[in-house]
Image (cartoon, rainbow, N blue to C red):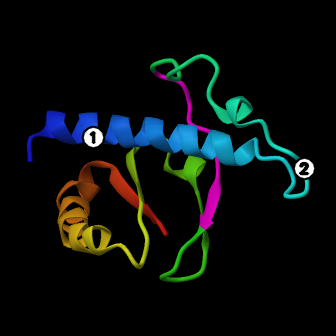
Amino acid sequence: MNRNVIVVLCVVIGITALLLVGKRASKPPANQAVDAGALLPSSGDPPVGSVAPDFTLRSLSDGKSVQLSSLRGKTVLINFWATWCGPCKGEMPGLEKMQNKYGPQGFQILGVA
């Protein structure tokens, strides 16, 4: 796969992740009414070069916490998937190959189920 394609893919997925994390962080408690328009980003895309909001996930392989900021300096692809999603499961071997091929160059995939 062409390196430029991978970079563009990572940027698109990263921006999508930023928007999703921002919406999740701004959710009110479950018993409070929500204005759907308030959850939409007000200024469009984040500025180029801006830092993604930090978050922490637990690794399924060893149970340790993985913090996004600990991967600073690497190219990070965040892949949101579901265990019941056939196409999501189908893309896993390709993502694993990509991680194995580009991981030594600082590429890291985070799969979020």
Give the alpha-carbon distance from disc 2 to disc 1, as whole Å.
36 Å
Residue 27, horizontal then vertical, whole percent? 77, 46
Look at mark 1 in the image and give the residue it sits on.
9
- Amino acid identity at mark 1: Leu
Question: How many marks do you count on the picture?
Answer: 2
* Residue nearer the viewer, 91 or 60: 91
| Residue at image point 54% right, 24% down | 50
Res 102 → quadrant: bottom left
Q: Residues within 10 Å of mark 2 (few under 14, many from 20)?
A: few
Q: Looking at the image, is 51 positioned above or below residue 56?
A: above
Q: Looking at the image, is 61 positioned above or below residue 65?
A: below
Drawn side of residue 24 relative to residue 69, left or right: right
Q: Residues within 10 Å of mark 1 (few under 14, many from 20)?
A: few
Mark closer to the chain start, 2 or 1: 1
Res 57 → quadrant: bottom right
Q: Which mark is drawn over residue 21?
A: none
Look at mark 2 in the image and give the residue it sits on.
32
| Residue at image point 73% right, 45% down | 25
* Residue nearer the viewer, 8 or 63: 8
Q: Looking at the image, is 107 positioned above or below residue 52?
A: below
Q: Marks 2 and 1: which is nearer the front?
A: 2
Residue 89, horizontal then vertical, whole percent? 29, 74
Drawn side of residue 73 relative to residue 6, left or right: right
Residue 15 belongs to the span the image colors magenta: no
Which secondary structure type mostly characterizes the magenta part of the structure? Answer: loop
Q: Looking at the image, is 53 positioned above or below residue 106?
A: above
- Amino acid identity at mark 2: Gln
Q: Judge whether residue 103 can be spotted in this image.
A: yes
Secondary structure state at the residue bearing disc 1: helix
Q: Which residues are magenta?
A: 49-57
Residue 32, horizontal then vertical, whole percent? 90, 49
Secondary structure state at the residue bearing disc 2: loop
